[in-house]
Amino acid sequence: MISYKEKNMVSFLDNVIAYKENMTIYSDQLDVYSDKKQNELKKIIAIGHVKIIKKDMVGTCEKAIYEESEKTLTMLGNPVVVKEDNVIEGSKIVYYQEDDNIVAHSDQDKKVEVTLFPEQLEKAKESNEKKEN
């Protein structure tokens, strides 16, 4: 662990495992930024062999940035998200924690690729219908 007081940042190195609410982050390096009082989390940056596990979702990438104020997780560097049997790939994937929503972005080098399984969609639809009644 290395602390950078002037940046309000602590860096953890080598096979890092971090827990944030119901999310687990694995990476080679993890940088944690806090406010000046160091009482509140501002941002987490995971670098190298990043793996994120949250409920029924697993994401992998080379770099992930979690923004506390926005409650977003941005995955960069060959990001892939697997939720149940469904697979999403893109140049950048953003997970919106509050809405439990995933948005995949493309660029000129990498198009968004999605593999969906209809039975998973049907199960989700049935589950939502039961919750509404």
Image (cartoon, helix red, strand yellow):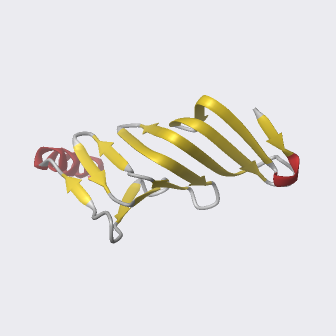
In the displayed orientation, state which residue is furthest to the front. 109
In the displayed orientation, state which residue is furthest to the bottom. 108
Residue 114 located left or right of residue 97:
left
| Residue 42 x %, y % | 70, 54
Question: In this view of the protein, which residue sits in the foreground, 118 or 94?
Answer: 94
Residue 28 located left or right of residue 1:
left
Question: In this view of the protein, which residue sits in the foreground, 91 or 93?
Answer: 91
Screen quadrant of the N terminus:
top right
| Residue 97 x %, y % | 49, 53
Q: How many marks?
A: 0
Relative height, residue 17 to residue 127 (above, below): above
The residue at 61%/49% (across/down) is 45
The residue at 69%/35% (across/down) is 12
The residue at 54%/36% (across/down) is 27
| Residue 39 x %, y % | 81, 46
Residue 90 lies in quadrant: bottom left
Question: In this view of the protein, which residue sits in the foreground, 17 or 47?
Answer: 47
The residue at 47%/46% (across/down) is 62
Residue 23 located left or right of residue 18:
left
